[in-house]
Amino acid sequence: MTAGPARLEFPDGFVWGTATASYQIEGGASADGRGPSIWDVFSHTPGRTLDGDTGDVACDHYHRWRDDLSLLDELGVASYRFSVAWPRVVPTGSGAVNEAGLDFYDRLVDGLLERGIDPLVTLYHWDLPQSLEDGGGWLARDTALRFAEYAGVVAGRLGDRVGHFSTFNEPYCSAVLGYGSGVHAPGVRGIETALIAAHHLNLAHGLGATALRAHAPRDVQVSVVLNVAQVYPATDAPADVIAARHVDDLANRIFLDPMLRGHYPETLLEETSRHTDWAFVHDGDLEQIHVPLDALGVNYYSPSRICGPRPGLSTDPDAAPSTGRWIEDPTAAGKPTPVPWPATDRAWSVPQPGPYTDMGWRIEPEAFTDLLLRLSNDYPELPLLVTENGCAYPDGPGPDGRVRDDRRIDYLRSHLAAVHAAIDKGADIRGYYLWSMLDNFEWALGYRKRFGLVHVDYDTQVRTPKDSAWWYRDVIRANTVS
Ligand code: FCB
């Protein structure tokens, strides 16, 4: 007799959820006084997104939120992670508050609470008001101050019912894809610009966390969500080990160190000194950034293998694609050549063997366990939340209307097992938010990449829960993966 599949029971009180983001699902781009964001402008610029897709309508969640709450209810999630669109609440990024925009989130929060679902609210999931971008965006220090004002407005209005806020989602992507490789809005390329943006995002995080606590009418939990990169040197060669450490600085410790330790990594300052003198870090900034947090949100999809300089590799940072987002499958495309890591001339990302998801991202659940254990060892005082994990596959309804997305179920099963393994080894992981509740606007890749538990027909807006949705519902009910 062979043993059946392992039954992995999660700790009591483990929080099961799903996650979305405003620009990816809401639509209603100019409804009720919403101002334009950098993603509206970027996606409407020819050539910036696949098929010229925009978030104008997306999943029309702005109008269909009640139906979407019913879906969450059917799944049985304990919590729902969503983001507030800054340009809906403060259309020009500073000054006048748009009450109608706040009303939308007010109703959403009430609707969640009526269904017994706990909201986890992200303040910034990449949709900066365009007016602020016109004044320099994240290259302007002032944007951090405007963010703190906006954080205070949201906390004042929702903080009586929302018990947990995250300041930022993946500031790495905002800084490095937005102001480094330029494949995300606002499309700026450069090395120094990415570093300046990262610092201003850090400052905004600290000021925002302080504003949240000052303006919420009761005690709220505050966290940040980082896509901490799980990087491995491609070989044991010293050049590769150094390059992997450099990427760890540039992708991870550039946020983790100031936020959780109150300084920037010395090696990062040294290794970027050719590009910047870091004069944009003012006296007192690090104290403002280094504020107590209640949890660390971690997004994980896939690991990276890094190498250092090798003969023949391009050192032109302009040649860097957005590693891990655009590369579909470099091996299959006949280009097994390492590509420059964005916003640096010191490290390259080495194509990895499959299996891949539809994003071309390698599937490696063991790397997820490694990542969670690293964070738990480095920051034992901080509870962890998996704030995103999931996969894209193109499956749609078959002739019988059912969406058979077995590959998603396999991915989820193996990645939940990876979370369980980390808990078993002592990591304090409090919950798991699956990305995503719905198929949605996958940024520069538009609507082609489907991450949802629920299929969306973008012509009719019909929602169809996939097989994985029912599988996840059963996991939640049993608090067990089998
Ligand atoms: C993360 C983003 C999220 C989604 C997933 C696939 O980097 O936070 O909005 O695009 O990737």
Image: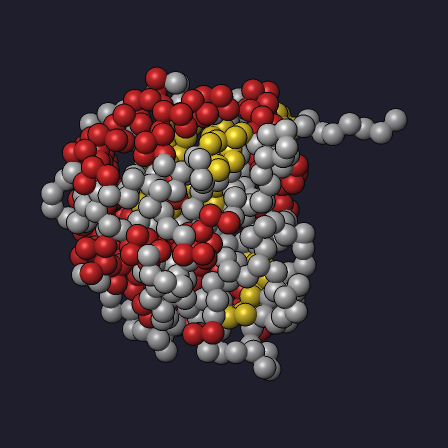
Q: Please say if 378 is above or below 13.
A: below
Q: Please say if 14 is above or below 386.
A: above
Q: Position of residue 284 (x, y in %)?
A: 21, 57
| Residue occupying image coordinates x 36% and y 69% | 189
Left or right: 157 in relation to 25:
left
| Residue occupying image coordinates x 59% and y 30% | 401
Instruction: Look at the image and tell me whether residue 264 can be seen.
Output: no
Q: Position of residue 380 (x, y in %)?
A: 47, 41
Instruction: Look at the image and tell me whether residue 461 can be seen.
Output: yes
Left or right: 108 in relation to 463:
left
Task: Give the quadrant of the C terminus.
Answer: top right
Q: Residue reaching furthest bottom?
A: 311
| Residue occupying image coordinates x 40% and y 25% | 67
Q: Please say if 430 is above or below 204.
A: above
The image quarter containing residue 476 is top right
The one of 272 and 86 positioned closer to us in this rendering: 86
The image quarter containing residue 32 is top left
Q: Residue reaching furthest left?
A: 96
The one of 280 and 472 positioned closer to us in this rendering: 472
The one of 193 and 429 positioned closer to us in this rendering: 193
Task: Give the quadrant of the N terminus.
Answer: top right
Number of numbered tags placed on the structure image: 0
Q: Position of residue 378 (x, y in %)?
A: 48, 48
| Residue occupying image coordinates x 43% and y 35% | 461
Q: Position of residue 272 (x, y in %)?
A: 39, 72
